[in-house]
Amino acid sequence: MLNKSSLEYIDDIKEKVNSPKKVELLTEDMMWETHGPLIWQADQFDGKPFFYPVYRYKNFYSYSQLALILKKKKLVLNRNAYEKAGSADFAALSHEQLIDVEIERLGAPYSSTNEITDSDDYCAKIVNALKDDIADIEEKNPGHTNVVMCGGKDSLNLLLLPWRNPVIAVSAEPNYPLVCEFVEHNGLDIDVLRLSDDVTDGFLKREIAELCCRFNAVHWRWGQHLNKISEMFDRKVVIWKGQMGDLYMSTRWKTYTYGKNNLYTFLCKIYGKISPYLPPVLNEIGAKIILPGVEQRVWKYGANAQGAHVGFIRAITGCLVLSAYHGKRMSKILKSADLGKVAQKDIRDEIGEALLGRKVIYPRKNPAPRISDKRLGLHNPELFVDLLESNDIEIINSRD
Protein backbone atom coordinates (compact mmCIF):
# COMPACT_ATOMS: atom_id res chain seq x y z
CA MET A 1 0.00 0.00 0.00
CA LEU A 2 1.05 3.60 -0.54
CA ASN A 3 2.28 5.57 2.44
CA LYS A 4 -0.28 7.81 4.09
CA SER A 5 0.38 11.52 3.82
CA SER A 6 -1.38 14.84 3.39
CA LEU A 7 -1.99 15.35 -0.32
CA GLU A 8 -1.50 18.80 -1.81
CA TYR A 9 -3.97 17.86 -4.54
CA ILE A 10 -6.70 17.36 -1.92
CA ASP A 11 -5.77 20.61 -0.20
CA ASP A 12 -6.20 22.45 -3.50
CA ILE A 13 -9.64 20.95 -4.03
CA LYS A 14 -10.70 21.83 -0.50
CA GLU A 15 -10.06 25.47 -1.36
CA LYS A 16 -11.90 25.29 -4.69
CA VAL A 17 -15.08 23.71 -3.30
CA ASN A 18 -15.51 26.57 -0.85
CA SER A 19 -16.46 28.86 -3.74
CA PRO A 20 -19.04 27.07 -5.92
CA LYS A 21 -20.51 28.88 -8.90
CA LYS A 22 -24.12 29.70 -8.08
CA VAL A 23 -26.87 29.56 -10.72
CA GLU A 24 -30.62 29.07 -10.64
CA LEU A 25 -30.69 26.50 -13.47
CA LEU A 26 -27.75 24.22 -14.31
CA THR A 27 -27.51 22.13 -17.51
CA GLU A 28 -25.15 19.44 -18.77
CA ASP A 29 -23.91 21.79 -21.50
CA MET A 30 -22.91 24.40 -18.91
CA MET A 31 -20.76 21.78 -17.18
CA TRP A 32 -19.27 20.18 -20.29
CA GLU A 33 -18.53 22.95 -22.81
CA THR A 34 -15.75 24.71 -20.91
CA HIS A 35 -13.58 23.55 -18.05
CA GLY A 36 -15.26 26.05 -15.76
CA PRO A 37 -15.74 25.64 -12.02
CA LEU A 38 -15.09 22.42 -10.15
CA ILE A 39 -18.37 22.63 -8.30
CA TRP A 40 -21.72 24.30 -8.96
CA GLN A 41 -24.57 25.28 -6.67
CA ALA A 42 -27.95 25.31 -8.38
CA ASP A 43 -31.63 25.41 -7.52
CA GLN A 44 -32.43 23.04 -10.38
CA PHE A 45 -30.70 20.76 -12.89
CA ASP A 46 -32.21 20.37 -16.36
CA GLY A 47 -31.42 17.28 -18.42
CA LYS A 48 -30.74 13.55 -18.30
CA PRO A 49 -27.09 12.92 -19.25
CA PHE A 50 -26.53 9.53 -20.85
CA PHE A 51 -22.73 9.69 -21.09
CA TYR A 52 -20.96 12.50 -19.23
CA PRO A 53 -20.80 12.21 -15.42
CA VAL A 54 -22.82 14.70 -13.38
CA TYR A 55 -22.77 14.00 -9.64
CA ARG A 56 -25.03 15.66 -7.07
CA TYR A 57 -25.04 16.17 -3.32
CA LYS A 58 -28.04 18.18 -2.18
CA ASN A 59 -27.90 21.28 -4.43
CA PHE A 60 -24.20 20.94 -5.29
CA TYR A 61 -23.06 19.47 -8.62
CA SER A 62 -19.72 18.35 -10.03
CA TYR A 63 -18.09 16.00 -12.53
CA SER A 64 -15.96 14.83 -9.59
CA GLN A 65 -17.28 12.71 -6.72
CA LEU A 66 -14.21 13.66 -4.73
CA ALA A 67 -15.08 17.35 -4.94
CA LEU A 68 -18.49 16.70 -3.38
CA ILE A 69 -17.00 14.51 -0.64
CA LEU A 70 -14.54 17.27 0.24
CA LYS A 71 -17.33 19.85 0.08
CA LYS A 72 -19.30 18.02 2.78
CA LYS A 73 -16.08 17.11 4.65
CA LYS A 74 -17.14 13.54 5.20
CA LEU A 75 -17.47 10.20 3.45
CA VAL A 76 -20.67 8.34 4.27
CA LEU A 77 -19.25 5.00 3.29
CA ASN A 78 -21.44 2.58 1.38
CA ARG A 79 -20.37 -0.72 2.93
CA ASN A 80 -21.84 -2.77 0.09
CA ALA A 81 -19.85 -0.75 -2.44
CA TYR A 82 -16.77 -1.03 -0.22
CA GLU A 83 -17.01 -4.82 -0.16
CA LYS A 84 -17.65 -5.05 -3.89
CA ALA A 85 -14.69 -2.81 -4.77
CA GLY A 86 -12.48 -4.91 -2.54
CA SER A 87 -13.41 -8.21 -4.17
CA ALA A 88 -10.92 -10.18 -6.27
CA ASP A 89 -13.02 -10.04 -9.45
CA PHE A 90 -14.00 -6.36 -9.18
CA ALA A 91 -14.76 -4.58 -12.45
CA ALA A 92 -16.86 -1.52 -11.63
CA LEU A 93 -19.37 0.01 -9.24
CA SER A 94 -22.76 0.73 -10.77
CA HIS A 95 -24.37 4.16 -11.04
CA GLU A 96 -26.69 3.14 -8.21
CA GLN A 97 -23.89 1.99 -5.90
CA LEU A 98 -21.38 4.79 -5.42
CA ILE A 99 -18.84 4.70 -2.60
CA ASP A 100 -20.67 7.54 -0.79
CA VAL A 101 -24.38 6.99 -0.16
CA GLU A 102 -25.12 10.72 -0.07
CA ILE A 103 -23.92 11.29 -3.64
CA GLU A 104 -25.88 10.31 -6.74
CA ARG A 105 -25.08 10.27 -10.43
CA LEU A 106 -27.68 12.02 -12.55
CA GLY A 107 -28.77 10.59 -15.87
CA ALA A 108 -30.64 7.77 -17.53
CA PRO A 109 -30.60 5.60 -20.64
CA TYR A 110 -31.88 7.31 -23.77
CA SER A 111 -34.51 5.79 -26.02
CA SER A 112 -34.01 6.37 -29.75
CA THR A 113 -36.80 7.95 -31.74
CA ASN A 114 -35.64 5.96 -34.81
CA GLU A 115 -36.24 8.96 -37.07
CA ILE A 116 -33.01 8.53 -39.07
CA THR A 117 -33.39 5.44 -41.23
CA ASP A 118 -31.19 6.07 -44.27
CA SER A 119 -27.48 5.20 -43.97
CA ASP A 120 -26.25 7.91 -46.35
CA ASP A 121 -28.32 10.52 -44.54
CA TYR A 122 -26.95 9.24 -41.23
CA CYS A 123 -23.34 9.60 -42.47
CA ALA A 124 -23.95 13.13 -43.71
CA LYS A 125 -25.58 14.14 -40.44
CA ILE A 126 -22.68 12.71 -38.41
CA VAL A 127 -20.10 14.58 -40.49
CA ASN A 128 -21.94 17.88 -40.10
CA ALA A 129 -22.57 17.35 -36.39
CA LEU A 130 -18.90 16.56 -35.69
CA LYS A 131 -17.80 19.69 -37.54
CA ASP A 132 -20.34 21.92 -35.81
CA ASP A 133 -19.69 20.47 -32.35
CA ILE A 134 -15.92 20.93 -32.47
CA ALA A 135 -16.32 24.43 -33.94
CA ASP A 136 -18.62 25.30 -31.05
CA ILE A 137 -16.16 24.00 -28.44
CA GLU A 138 -13.23 25.79 -30.09
CA GLU A 139 -15.18 29.05 -30.07
CA LYS A 140 -16.01 28.64 -26.38
CA ASN A 141 -12.36 27.79 -25.57
CA PRO A 142 -10.25 30.31 -27.51
CA GLY A 143 -6.49 29.93 -27.39
CA HIS A 144 -6.71 26.26 -26.43
CA THR A 145 -4.77 23.45 -28.13
CA ASN A 146 -6.71 20.34 -29.13
CA VAL A 147 -5.07 17.13 -27.91
CA VAL A 148 -6.61 14.14 -29.69
CA MET A 149 -6.07 10.72 -28.11
CA CYS A 150 -5.76 8.26 -30.98
CA GLY A 151 -5.94 4.51 -31.48
CA GLY A 152 -8.59 3.08 -33.80
CA LYS A 153 -10.68 4.48 -36.66
CA ASP A 154 -13.08 6.33 -34.37
CA SER A 155 -10.37 8.59 -32.98
CA LEU A 156 -8.28 8.69 -36.16
CA ASN A 157 -11.24 10.18 -38.01
CA LEU A 158 -11.14 13.07 -35.55
CA LEU A 159 -7.78 14.11 -36.99
CA LEU A 160 -9.57 14.75 -40.29
CA LEU A 161 -11.88 17.41 -38.84
CA PRO A 162 -11.42 21.08 -39.89
CA TRP A 163 -9.81 22.24 -36.65
CA ARG A 164 -9.27 25.99 -36.26
CA ASN A 165 -7.15 25.91 -33.11
CA PRO A 166 -3.82 24.03 -33.01
CA VAL A 167 -4.12 20.23 -32.80
CA ILE A 168 -1.73 17.47 -31.78
CA ALA A 169 -2.29 13.73 -31.63
CA VAL A 170 -1.20 11.54 -28.73
CA SER A 171 -1.04 7.76 -28.76
CA ALA A 172 0.48 4.99 -26.69
CA GLU A 173 2.18 1.79 -27.76
CA PRO A 174 1.41 -0.35 -29.68
CA ASN A 175 -0.75 2.13 -31.65
CA TYR A 176 1.74 5.02 -31.69
CA PRO A 177 3.63 4.00 -34.89
CA LEU A 178 0.30 3.24 -36.60
CA VAL A 179 -1.01 6.71 -35.80
CA CYS A 180 2.23 8.21 -37.16
CA GLU A 181 1.72 6.23 -40.39
CA PHE A 182 -1.90 7.38 -40.60
CA VAL A 183 -0.85 11.03 -40.36
CA GLU A 184 1.90 10.55 -42.96
CA HIS A 185 -0.11 8.45 -45.43
CA ASN A 186 -3.01 10.90 -45.42
CA GLY A 187 -0.89 14.04 -45.69
CA LEU A 188 -1.92 15.55 -42.35
CA ASP A 189 0.15 18.34 -40.82
CA ILE A 190 -0.22 17.08 -37.25
CA ASP A 191 2.46 16.23 -34.70
CA VAL A 192 2.08 12.90 -32.88
CA LEU A 193 3.34 12.49 -29.32
CA ARG A 194 3.97 9.10 -27.72
CA LEU A 195 2.03 8.59 -24.49
CA SER A 196 3.85 6.78 -21.69
CA ASP A 197 2.47 5.12 -18.58
CA ASP A 198 5.13 6.44 -16.22
CA VAL A 199 3.64 7.36 -12.88
CA THR A 200 4.99 8.51 -9.51
CA ASP A 201 3.82 7.62 -6.03
CA GLY A 202 2.45 11.11 -5.49
CA PHE A 203 0.41 11.07 -8.66
CA LEU A 204 -0.97 7.62 -7.87
CA LYS A 205 -2.43 9.12 -4.69
CA ARG A 206 -4.12 11.76 -6.82
CA GLU A 207 -5.63 9.01 -8.96
CA ILE A 208 -6.76 7.03 -5.91
CA ALA A 209 -8.52 10.14 -4.62
CA GLU A 210 -10.34 10.89 -7.89
CA LEU A 211 -11.06 7.27 -8.71
CA CYS A 212 -13.41 6.92 -5.71
CA CYS A 213 -13.25 3.12 -6.21
CA ARG A 214 -15.44 3.37 -9.33
CA PHE A 215 -13.54 1.17 -11.74
CA ASN A 216 -10.70 -1.32 -11.94
CA ALA A 217 -7.80 1.12 -12.19
CA VAL A 218 -5.67 -0.98 -14.56
CA HIS A 219 -7.86 0.24 -17.44
CA TRP A 220 -7.64 3.98 -16.62
CA ARG A 221 -4.18 4.83 -17.96
CA TRP A 222 -1.84 7.67 -18.97
CA GLY A 223 -3.18 10.17 -16.45
CA GLN A 224 0.19 11.51 -15.35
CA HIS A 225 1.51 11.98 -18.88
CA LEU A 226 -1.69 13.73 -19.96
CA ASN A 227 -1.28 15.97 -16.93
CA LYS A 228 2.26 16.84 -18.03
CA ILE A 229 0.99 17.69 -21.50
CA SER A 230 -1.69 19.96 -20.05
CA GLU A 231 1.00 21.65 -17.94
CA MET A 232 3.05 22.29 -21.10
CA PHE A 233 0.16 24.40 -22.40
CA ASP A 234 -0.65 26.03 -19.05
CA ARG A 235 -3.84 23.92 -18.86
CA LYS A 236 -5.19 25.61 -21.99
CA VAL A 237 -5.94 22.36 -23.79
CA VAL A 238 -9.03 20.38 -24.71
CA ILE A 239 -8.37 16.64 -24.66
CA TRP A 240 -10.51 14.75 -27.17
CA LYS A 241 -11.42 11.07 -27.27
CA GLY A 242 -13.40 9.03 -29.80
CA GLN A 243 -15.46 7.18 -27.22
CA MET A 244 -17.89 4.52 -28.45
CA GLY A 245 -17.78 5.62 -32.07
CA ASP A 246 -17.57 2.02 -33.27
CA LEU A 247 -20.80 1.26 -31.42
CA TYR A 248 -22.75 3.75 -33.52
CA MET A 249 -20.89 3.52 -36.84
CA SER A 250 -20.19 -0.19 -37.22
CA THR A 251 -22.00 -3.42 -36.39
CA ARG A 252 -20.58 -3.60 -32.87
CA TRP A 253 -23.97 -2.62 -31.43
CA LYS A 254 -25.21 -6.11 -32.31
CA THR A 255 -23.08 -7.61 -29.53
CA TYR A 256 -23.27 -4.66 -27.12
CA THR A 257 -26.33 -5.74 -25.20
CA TYR A 258 -27.56 -5.63 -21.63
CA GLY A 259 -29.00 -9.00 -20.64
CA LYS A 260 -32.41 -8.89 -18.99
CA ASN A 261 -32.20 -12.65 -18.58
CA ASN A 262 -30.25 -15.61 -19.94
CA LEU A 263 -32.67 -16.26 -22.81
CA TYR A 264 -32.49 -12.63 -23.97
CA THR A 265 -28.68 -12.68 -23.84
CA PHE A 266 -28.60 -15.96 -25.75
CA LEU A 267 -30.90 -14.63 -28.49
CA CYS A 268 -28.77 -11.48 -28.81
CA LYS A 269 -25.64 -13.55 -29.31
CA ILE A 270 -27.34 -15.70 -31.91
CA TYR A 271 -28.57 -12.61 -33.77
CA GLY A 272 -25.09 -11.10 -33.77
CA LYS A 273 -23.64 -14.23 -35.38
CA ILE A 274 -26.29 -14.86 -38.03
CA SER A 275 -27.11 -11.22 -38.81
CA PRO A 276 -24.77 -10.95 -41.85
CA TYR A 277 -26.67 -13.79 -43.51
CA LEU A 278 -30.22 -12.59 -42.82
CA PRO A 279 -32.42 -10.76 -45.33
CA PRO A 280 -33.00 -7.05 -44.50
CA VAL A 281 -36.49 -7.60 -43.09
CA LEU A 282 -35.36 -10.23 -40.56
CA ASN A 283 -32.29 -8.14 -39.71
CA GLU A 284 -34.49 -5.19 -38.82
CA ILE A 285 -36.78 -7.39 -36.70
CA GLY A 286 -33.75 -8.70 -34.80
CA ALA A 287 -32.48 -5.16 -34.32
CA LYS A 288 -35.77 -4.05 -32.77
CA ILE A 289 -35.41 -6.82 -30.19
CA ILE A 290 -31.79 -6.01 -29.39
CA LEU A 291 -31.61 -2.21 -29.49
CA PRO A 292 -33.45 -1.50 -26.20
CA GLY A 293 -30.80 -3.62 -24.49
CA VAL A 294 -28.06 -1.72 -26.30
CA GLU A 295 -29.44 1.59 -25.02
CA GLN A 296 -29.50 0.20 -21.48
CA ARG A 297 -25.89 -0.99 -21.78
CA VAL A 298 -24.76 2.42 -23.09
CA TRP A 299 -25.87 3.83 -19.75
CA LYS A 300 -25.04 0.98 -17.40
CA TYR A 301 -21.60 0.21 -18.87
CA GLY A 302 -20.55 2.74 -21.50
CA ALA A 303 -21.29 5.80 -19.39
CA ASN A 304 -19.88 4.03 -16.35
CA ALA A 305 -16.60 2.95 -17.93
CA GLN A 306 -15.87 5.48 -20.67
CA GLY A 307 -17.98 8.44 -19.61
CA ALA A 308 -16.68 8.34 -16.06
CA HIS A 309 -13.12 8.03 -17.36
CA VAL A 310 -13.56 11.31 -19.26
CA GLY A 311 -14.53 13.00 -15.98
CA PHE A 312 -11.63 11.30 -14.16
CA ILE A 313 -9.03 12.57 -16.66
CA ARG A 314 -10.62 16.02 -16.57
CA ALA A 315 -10.30 16.15 -12.79
CA ILE A 316 -6.68 15.00 -12.55
CA THR A 317 -5.43 17.16 -15.44
CA GLY A 318 -7.38 20.33 -14.70
CA CYS A 319 -8.52 20.75 -18.31
CA LEU A 320 -11.59 20.00 -20.40
CA VAL A 321 -11.84 16.40 -21.67
CA LEU A 322 -14.49 15.50 -24.24
CA SER A 323 -15.76 12.69 -26.41
CA ALA A 324 -16.30 13.99 -29.93
CA TYR A 325 -19.09 11.47 -30.42
CA HIS A 326 -21.08 12.87 -27.49
CA GLY A 327 -21.28 16.56 -28.37
CA LYS A 328 -24.56 18.45 -28.31
CA ARG A 329 -25.44 17.81 -31.96
CA MET A 330 -23.95 14.32 -32.16
CA SER A 331 -25.97 13.25 -29.14
CA LYS A 332 -29.20 14.32 -30.86
CA ILE A 333 -28.28 12.20 -33.88
CA LEU A 334 -27.48 9.17 -31.75
CA LYS A 335 -30.84 9.52 -30.03
CA SER A 336 -32.58 9.70 -33.42
CA ALA A 337 -30.86 6.89 -35.34
CA ASP A 338 -32.37 3.50 -36.06
CA LEU A 339 -29.14 1.48 -35.92
CA GLY A 340 -30.93 -1.52 -37.33
CA LYS A 341 -31.27 0.38 -40.62
CA VAL A 342 -28.35 2.83 -40.69
CA ALA A 343 -25.55 0.69 -39.22
CA GLN A 344 -25.86 -2.74 -40.81
CA LYS A 345 -22.28 -2.24 -42.03
CA ASP A 346 -19.18 -0.33 -40.91
CA ILE A 347 -19.59 3.24 -42.17
CA ARG A 348 -16.47 4.76 -40.58
CA ASP A 349 -14.53 4.68 -43.86
CA GLU A 350 -17.31 6.67 -45.53
CA ILE A 351 -17.30 9.22 -42.72
CA GLY A 352 -13.52 9.57 -42.95
CA GLU A 353 -13.70 10.07 -46.72
CA ALA A 354 -16.40 12.73 -46.32
CA LEU A 355 -14.24 14.57 -43.78
CA LEU A 356 -10.99 14.38 -45.76
CA GLY A 357 -12.50 14.80 -49.23
CA ARG A 358 -10.73 11.72 -50.56
CA LYS A 359 -10.21 8.06 -49.71
CA VAL A 360 -8.60 7.60 -46.30
CA ILE A 361 -5.74 5.18 -45.70
CA TYR A 362 -6.21 3.46 -42.34
CA PRO A 363 -3.88 1.12 -40.43
CA ARG A 364 -4.66 -2.53 -41.13
CA LYS A 365 -4.84 -3.34 -37.43
CA ASN A 366 -5.85 -1.74 -34.14
CA PRO A 367 -4.00 -3.54 -31.33
CA ALA A 368 -5.23 -3.01 -27.79
CA PRO A 369 -2.83 -1.35 -25.35
CA ARG A 370 -1.67 -3.27 -22.31
CA ILE A 371 -3.38 -2.82 -18.99
CA SER A 372 -1.53 -0.65 -16.49
CA ASP A 373 0.19 -3.02 -14.07
CA LYS A 374 1.36 0.04 -12.15
CA ARG A 375 -2.27 0.69 -11.19
CA LEU A 376 -3.01 -2.84 -10.05
CA GLY A 377 -5.24 -2.65 -6.97
CA LEU A 378 -5.41 1.14 -7.03
CA HIS A 379 -9.20 0.94 -6.74
CA ASN A 380 -8.92 -0.88 -3.39
CA PRO A 381 -11.29 0.92 -1.00
CA GLU A 382 -8.81 0.61 1.87
CA LEU A 383 -6.43 2.89 -0.02
CA PHE A 384 -9.18 5.41 -0.67
CA VAL A 385 -10.47 5.49 2.91
CA ASP A 386 -6.94 5.69 4.35
CA LEU A 387 -6.12 8.58 2.04
CA LEU A 388 -9.23 10.53 3.04
CA GLU A 389 -8.68 9.87 6.72
CA SER A 390 -5.09 11.10 6.53
CA ASN A 391 -6.46 14.30 4.98
CA ASP A 392 -8.93 14.97 7.80
CA ILE A 393 -12.08 13.67 6.13
CA GLU A 394 -14.55 12.06 8.52
CA ILE A 395 -15.53 8.46 7.65
CA ILE A 396 -19.06 7.40 8.57
CA ASN A 397 -20.14 3.81 7.94
CA SER A 398 -23.43 3.04 6.25
CA ARG A 399 -24.98 0.13 4.37
CA ASP A 400 -26.88 1.11 1.25
Image (cartoon, rainbow, N blue to C red):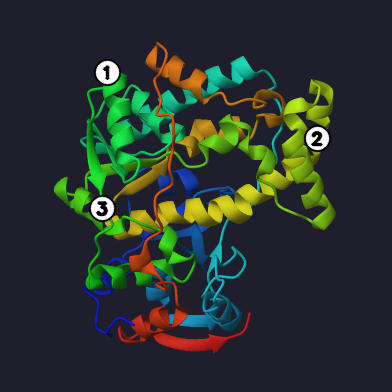
Which corner quadrant of the image does residue 14 belong to?
bottom left
Q: Residue 274 in the image: x percent, y percent?
A: 77, 34
Pick whichever, 344 or 342, lies toward us. 344
At a point 67% along the width and 18% down the height, the residue shown is 118
Q: Residue 341 in the image: x percent, y percent?
A: 71, 24
Q: Name the residue under label 2.
A: 286
Q: How far apart are marks 2 and 3 (CA)?
A: 43 Å
Provide the secondary structure element on which disc 1 rests: loop
Residue 59 in view: no
The quadrant in which the C terminus is found is: bottom right
Q: Is tag 1's residue or tag 2's residue first in the polypeptide sequence?
A: 1
Pointer 3 local density, CA inside 10 Å: few below 14, some 14–19, many at least 20: some
Q: Residue 182 in the image: x percent, y percent?
A: 33, 27
Q: Name the residue under label 1.
A: 187
- Is residue 375 toward the left or the right of residue 252 in the image? left
Amino acid type at circle 3 is: Ser
Residue 142 in view: yes
Q: Residue 144 in the image: x percent, y percent?
A: 23, 38
Provide the secondary structure element on which disc 3 rests: loop
Amino acid type at circle 1 is: Gly
